[in-house]
């Protein structure tokens, strides 16, 4: 039985000085959470986030990284640096990175491999845009993104990867697909994992939903059998609302 996995993606929000007070408010509200809780913060906030989550059930992740360990890559942050600060997760291929920072399926694949090499858990984002959806291309688009992200990753590492299905048109819009549709689409992703890597890995794999998840709709999504929790953007910025999402069954 897979555990629910709830990740907050703070995007480019909160100052390094604000993340400690935020976590101190979140901590008591989620201490009895049944699922796993991860907070993906800006790289500047990782150190404080790790400090304030020590000894709690909240884990820390980064939102991006380069795939090299060190070197002449001005402005980039490496998996080793993230790991050294105490983060355990990293978002890879978020649609904002793909759209605004020209991240490609190729670079996503490099980052997945690097995250695994340096002991970080990659949370790989896939999802269709509105036009692809209108042309009934959802399955094709997400399966291609998935296959390219996992290309040449050894089979024994696949179960360590988390997938987040985030349709682009649902991000930050307040619009969401129906829970049955998300359940079906995540089922396609799991089926692809099953045919490529076998039943056991497919059953272990955490596959989340992201896109306008909030305290009102989280229960609806997270109680579906294929949906292993969520990747939460805007609604994670207030600890009280994020806690309600995490404690969706209360
Ligand atoms: P929203 O929850 O703000 O729609 O963002 C979703 C997202 O992009 C999480 O990574």
Image: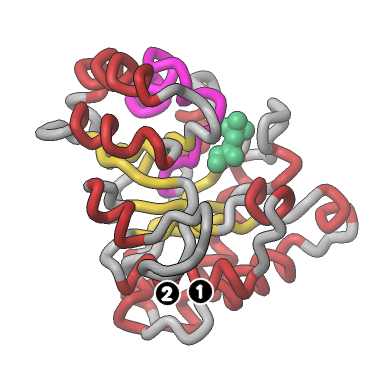
Q: Is residue 243 at least partly visible in the picture?
A: no
Q: Is residue 47 left or right of residue 170?
A: left
Q: Is residue 231 magenta?
A: yes
Q: Mark 1 sits on what residue?
A: 110
Residue depicted at 78% across the width and 51% down the height? 129
Left or right? Give the position of 190 relative to 114.
Answer: right
Picture coordinates of residue 67 (x, y %)? Answer: 46, 68
The label on residue 113 is 2
In terms of depth relative to the viewer, which is nearer, 179 or 45?
A: 45
Q: Residue at x 56, y 51 (%)?
A: 183
* Kind of element beneath mark 2: helix
Q: Is residue 4 above or below residue 176?
A: below
Quarter that holds the N terminus = bottom left
Looking at the rendering, the stretch of residues picked out in magenta corresponds to 228-250
Local SS, label 1: helix
Q: Residue at x 49, y 41 (%)?
A: 231
Q: Is mark 2 within 8 Å of ligand 1?
A: no
Q: Is residue 27 visible?
A: yes
Residue 15 place in picture, x, y as percent: 43, 22
139 in the magenta segment: no
């Amino acid at each position: 039985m897979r555990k629910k996995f709830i990740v907050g993606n703070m995007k480019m929000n909160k100052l390094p000085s604000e993340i400690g007070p935020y976590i101190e408010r979140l901590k008591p509200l989620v201490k009895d959470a049944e699922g796993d809780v991860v907070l993906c913060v800006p790289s500047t906030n990782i150190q404080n986030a790790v400090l304030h989550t020590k000894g709690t059930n909240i884990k820390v992740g980064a939102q991006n990284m380069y795939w090299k360990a060190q070197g002449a890559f001005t402005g980039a942050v490496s998996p080793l640096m993230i790991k050294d600060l105490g983060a355990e997760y990293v978002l890879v291929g978020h649609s904002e990175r793909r759209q605004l920072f020209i991240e490609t399926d190729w670079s996503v694949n490099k980052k997945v491999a690097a995250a695994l090499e340096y002991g970080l858990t990659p949370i790989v984002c896939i999802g269709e845009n509105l036009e692809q959806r209108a042309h009934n291309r959802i399955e094709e688009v997400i399966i291609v993104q998935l296959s390219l992200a996992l290309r040449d990753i050894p089979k024994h590492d696949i179960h360590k990867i988390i997938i987040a299905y985030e349709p682009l048109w649902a991000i930050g819009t307040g619009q969401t697909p129906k829970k049955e549709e998300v359940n079906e689409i995540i089922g396609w992703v799991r089926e692809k994992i099953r045919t490529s890597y076998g039943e056991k890995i497919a059953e272990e794999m955490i596959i989340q939903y992201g896109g306008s998840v909030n305290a009102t709709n989280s229960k609806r999504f997270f109680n579906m059998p294929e949906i292993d929790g969520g990747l939460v953007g805007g609604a994670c910025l207030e600890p009280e609302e994020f806690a309600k999402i995490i404690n969706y069954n209360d």
